[in-house]
Amino acid sequence: MRDVRTWWSGRLQKDRGGIAVYTAIVTVALLAIIGLAIDGSGKLRATKRADAVAMEAARAAGQAIDPAAAVTGTAVRADPAAAQAAAQAYLARASTQGSAALSADGTRLTVTVHDTYPTKFLAIAGIGSMDVTGHGSARLLYGTTQPQ
C-alpha cells in the first residue's frame, strides 16, 4: 500500500502546473476566435451600411432630373451636375466618402462608398481598421401605367 501511495504522490508532483499551462493556451485561443468573430461581424455590418448608404445616395441623385428635357417630353434623364451634387450631399450627411457616376444616356446612376471599420480586437495584432466598400445604383423610370 505504501508503494502505491509513493507512486501516486510522485506522479502528482510531476504533473503539477500542467493544467494551468493548458488553460492559458486554450483561453488565448478562445479569445482570438471570439475577437475574429466580433471584428468579422463588425466589418460585415459596416459593409451592409456602406451598401445602404450607396443605394440611398444613388436614389437621391436620381431625383435630380434634367427639367428642360423632362418638361418638353423629349427624355427623362438626370442632370449630371445636379445628380453629382445630390449624391455628394447625401454622402456628406451620412459622414462617408464616395464617388458617383452617371451613364452616357443619363438614366443609370452608380455610387461607390469608401469607409473604414475600426477594429476592436484585431487592434491588438496591429490591424487598427479595415477598409469597407459599398456599391449602389439606381435607374430612372417613368410612366403612368408601366415603367419605361
Image: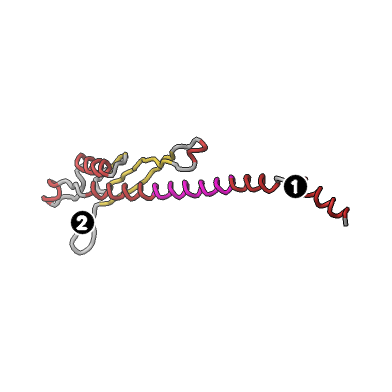
Q: Residue at x 39, y 40 (%)?
A: 116
Front residue of this view, candidates 20 and 39: 20
Figure check: 128 above or below 65: above
Q: CA distance from mark 1 to mark 2?
A: 79 Å
Answer with the quarter of the image where residue 103 lies. top left
Point out the residue furthest to the bottom here: 145
Residue that mark 2 sits on: 142
Where residue 112 sits: x, y (%)?
34, 43
Answer with the quarter of the image where residue 5 lies. bottom right
Q: Residue at x 71, y 46 (%)?
A: 18
Q: Main secondary structure of the magenta part?
A: helix
Q: Quadrant of the N terminus?
A: bottom right
Q: Which residues are magenta?
A: 28-47
Q: What is the three-letter code of the residue carrying label 1?
A: Asp
Where residue 87 sits: x, y (%)?
25, 43
Where residue 12 sits: x, y (%)?
77, 49
SS of the residue at dot 2?
A: loop
Label annotation for residue 15 = 1
